[in-house]
């Protein structure tokens, strides 16, 4: 696969803002638009998430499905924290009406690293009212190919809370070796290491599997179960319909 991680370090350290907003549009309901406030919260103790990628779309869009092979965009996030391939694919899909991304990692509130990142991120998105569903994807950074997400959940009339589980694409062996994991892993969770990680996927570790629930951290290499393991659900997603004042 040889998927590059070139954009991820820049994305991680470019800014520490906890949210990005697509401004609400006045009279939105009159012009075929709807506004939603979407909050993604990290519920783990020791797994940072990459900035979320969120899509608002109709029923015909499909971001991922358990039991099916992951598409290239989801693989790029799950293995390498590279958001761009999925953003590009979603932005070019006529069934997707809005795509937004975070601009900083979503790090557990109790993380021992004491990093200045936040454990939640909020977006406010004004979109075409034909968008009836939401999907999102974030990498579990201290894994080989782990991610969390939602696929095609219905947007609420008022508000609704969803809990997201952990998955793996089964496209990279779970070596749990810092040499095979996205470099920011150690620092975000406060684990010291002289291993710089890698800038590319290793073809020798490639697998041809399908998306399955993640079994968690075994802890027989660099990853420590006491630090990096988790229990599902790993994320809470709150979606609120914002009523525009006329």
Image: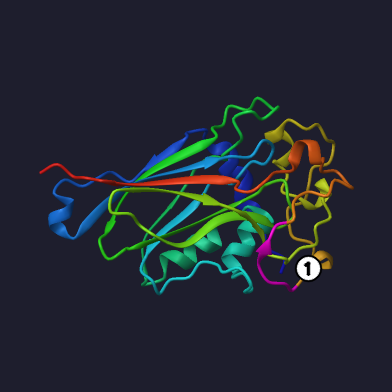
Residue 170 versus residue 221 in the image, above or below: below
Task: Confirm whether residue 55 shows in the render.
Answer: yes
Indicate whether residue 227 is drawn in magenta: no
Residue 50 versus residue 131 in the image, above or below: above
Q: Which residues are magenta?
A: 208-214
Q: Quadrant of the C terminus?
A: top left
Q: Nearer the viewer, residue 7 or 215?
A: 215
Provide residue 103's location: percent of width, then percent of height. 50, 42
Q: Secondary structure at mark 1?
A: loop
Q: Quadrant of residue 201?
A: bottom right
Task: Please tell me which residue is depicted at 22% across the width and 57% down the height of the picture.
Answer: 33
Provide residue 189's location: percent of width, then percent of height. 70, 34
Residue 237 versus residue 205 in the image, above or below: above
Specify whether 245 is left or right of 11: left
Q: Quadrant of residue 43?
A: top right
What main secondary structure does the magenta stretch of the protein show? loop
Q: Nearer the viewer, residue 9 or 217?
A: 217
Task: Confirm whether residue 83 shows in the render.
Answer: no
Task: Please tell me which residue is depicted at 74% across the width and 41% down the height of the picture.
Answer: 228
Residue 54 versus residue 235 in the image, above or below: below
Task: Please tell me which residue is depicted at 55% across the width and 67% down the height of the picture.
Answer: 64
Provide residue 184's location: percent of width, then percent of height. 69, 41
Task: Please tell me which residue is depicted at 55% across the width and 52% down the height of the picture.
Answer: 164
Which residue is identified by label 1? Answer: 206
Q: Quadrant of the N terminus?
A: bottom right
Q: Nearer the viewer, residue 205 or 216?
A: 216
Provide residue 40's location: percent of width, then percent of height. 48, 44
């Amino acid at each position: 696969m040889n998927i590059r991680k070139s954009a991820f370090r820049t994305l991680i350290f470019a800014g520490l803002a906890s949210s990005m907003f697509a401004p609400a549009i006045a009279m939105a309901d009159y012009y075929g638009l709807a506004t939603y406030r979407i909050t993604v919260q990290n519920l783990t103790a020791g797994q940072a998430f990459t900035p979320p990628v969120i899509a608002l779309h109709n029923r015909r869009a499909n971001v991922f499905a358990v039991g099916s092979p992951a598409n290239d965009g989801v693989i790029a996030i799950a293995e390498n924290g590279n958001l761009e391939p999925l953003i590009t694919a979603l932005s070019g899909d006529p069934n997707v009406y809005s795509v937004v991304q975070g601009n900083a990692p979503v790090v557990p509130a109790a993380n021992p690293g004491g990093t200045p990142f936040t454990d939640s991120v909020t977006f406010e998105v004004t979109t075409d009212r034909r968008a009836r569903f939401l999907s999102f994807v974030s990498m579990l950074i201290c894994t080989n190919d782990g991610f969390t997400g939602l696929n095609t959940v219905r947007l609420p009339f008022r508000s609704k809370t969803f809990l997201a589980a952990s998955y793996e694409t089964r496209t990279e062996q779970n070596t749990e070796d810092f040499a095979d994991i996205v470099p920011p892993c150690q620092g975000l969770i406060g684990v010291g290491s002289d291993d710089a990680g890698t800038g590319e996927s290793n073809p020798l570790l490639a697998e041809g599997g399908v998306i399955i629930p993640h079994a968690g951290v075994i802890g027989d290499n660099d990853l420590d179960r006491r630090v990096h393991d988790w229990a599902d659900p790993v994320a809470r997603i709150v979606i609120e319909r914002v009523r525009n004042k006329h």
